[in-house]
Amino acid sequence: MELIRNIFFNTDKLVENAKVKISYTGKFFQDGSEHVSIHYGFGTNWDNINDIVMEKTELGYQAEVQLLEGETFNFCFKNGNNDWDNNEGSNYIFPLEKVSTELIVLEDEPVSLGSAHKLRKSYLWSKKIRLAVYKIITYLPRIISGNYKRKLNGNEIN
């Protein structure tokens, strides 16, 4: 996904506590600079600042970054000559999404087998109800109209 010209991520959204691969094809890649690194931090105060040397590939300079907690992911690029690509002084800043914890089962919490039993039981009841509704819809009009024929030992009975 391209969020800003010449910067690509391997995901469609940036989520806290996840790894993301960044590809950079900006001015340092275009002018053939060697030794490009990404300088990054999190939040408005640039907490947890770190630098990673990026690997030069045919697709641009690439690096994998572990996203930490914060409202934003902030970064800029530096080459071996100490030149900076910092989005013309504004830095590259992207919002981070919080981790969705609704479906996460913590290891310390015991998993109740009763809930699985209840789910199975409710599934069986739903199948029985659907079958009963099907039979009512199919056979009730025949019984009411008198077009229903029952078979007893291979012979039809009216």
Image (cartoon, rainbow, N blue to C red):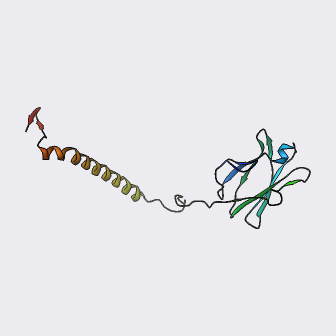
> Picture coordinates of residue 150 (x, y %)?
12, 39
As rendered, which of 6 and 77 lies closer to the eye? 6
Q: Residue furthest bottom?
A: 45
Image check: 71 left or right of 25? Answer: left
Image check: 65 left or right of 27? Answer: left
Which quadrant of the view contains residue 40?
A: bottom right
As rendered, which of 125 and 77 lies closer to the eye? 77
Which residue is drawn at the image coordinates 54% and 62% (left, top)?
A: 108
Q: Is residue 92 above or below residue 25?
A: below
As rendered, which of 51 and 2 lies closer to the eye? 2
As rendered, which of 112 and 134 lies closer to the eye? 134
Which residue is drawn at the image coordinates 32% and 52% (left, top)?
A: 126
Which residue is drawn at the image coordinates 68% and 64% (left, top)?
A: 71
Image check: 111 left or right of 150? Answer: right
> Picture coordinates of residue 138 (x, y %)?
22, 44
> Picture coordinates of residue 52 (x, y %)?
80, 52
Q: Quadrant of the C terminus?
A: top left
> Picture coordinates of residue 102 (x, y %)?
52, 61
Q: Residue furthest top?
A: 154
